[in-house]
Image: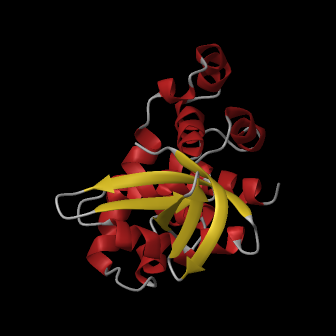
Amino acid sequence: MIYSLNGKLIHTEAGLAVVECGGVGYACKTTFTTLQAIAGKENVFLYTYMSVREDAVELFGFAEKEELKCFKLLISVNGVGPKAALSILSGMNTQQFALFVATSDPKALTKVKGIGAKTAQRIILELKDKLAGETISVRGQTGAAAPVNAAGANISEAVTALEVLGYTEGEALSVLGKLDPSLPVEELIKKALIGLARM
């Protein structure tokens, strides 16, 4: 599995970036967001995901780890393939995507070409559970769990969901610590994402 690419950007076009590493050009399907981030750069670093099917081997590249995480979450949803996932992440950034899922806003997702109402509802239903239901162990910092638990189960779930989206526990707690821990998890995530976007 190819984890990342670090090399010379030799070609870009709609939905594609080619990175040369060791004399080999790797064609990465990507989002408009990533293309904007790497535009004009000679050397780039992309986090990658390799899709292996019977009829094709495809490489996907992302400028930010958070975008890769959202891509993986999206393609885990039944009926959502890589093409649809790229379309969604090209139409919004990762914070907006997380906000739409946390606030159960399917209309925002249906604005993306090729995403119907049923698919949008399925994305929200399946990913809201995944974001809120991740285990504490994903942090890899057992010693830091105590203050989170002391703040309540809702805060704990919100921290975990934000970590899945690429924020550190410290960043999540710095924003969540200012909120009412009795709020529903979805509301905590929504308010935290707004706060983190302003940092």
Residue furthest right as drawn: 199
* Residue 184 can be seen, yes or no: no
164 above or below 150?
A: below
166 is higher (above) or lower (below) than 148: below
Q: Position of residue 179 (x, y in %)?
A: 72, 44
Q: Residue drawn 72% across and 60% down? A: 43
Residue 145, position in %: x, y? 61, 20
153 or 139, which is in the foreground? 139
Question: What colour scheme does the image use?
Answer: secondary structure
Q: Furthest-top residue in view?
A: 143
State the image coordinates of residue 3 (x, y, percent, origin top left). Answer: 50, 44
Q: Is residue 53 left or right of residue 110?
A: left
Nearer-the-camera pick, 90 or 14 = 14
- Residue drawn at x 50%, y 52% is 48
- The residue sitting at 45% across, 82% down in the picture is 112
How many labels were placed on the picture?
Answer: 0
Quadrant for the N terminus in the image: top left
Residue 143 seen in the current view: yes
Q: Furthest-front residue in view?
A: 23
Residue 158 percent across, percent down from the top left: 57, 41
From the viewer's side, name the closer residue of 6 and 92.
6
- Residue 191 is drawn in which quadrant? bottom right
Quarter of the picture holding the C terminus: bottom right
The structure residue drawn at horizontal position 52% and vertical position 37%, both measured from the top left corner, is: 157
Q: Is residue 176 left or right of residue 73?
A: right
User: Does residue 20 appear left or right of residue 107 in this picture?
Assistant: right
Q: Nearer the viewer, residue 149 or 199?
A: 199
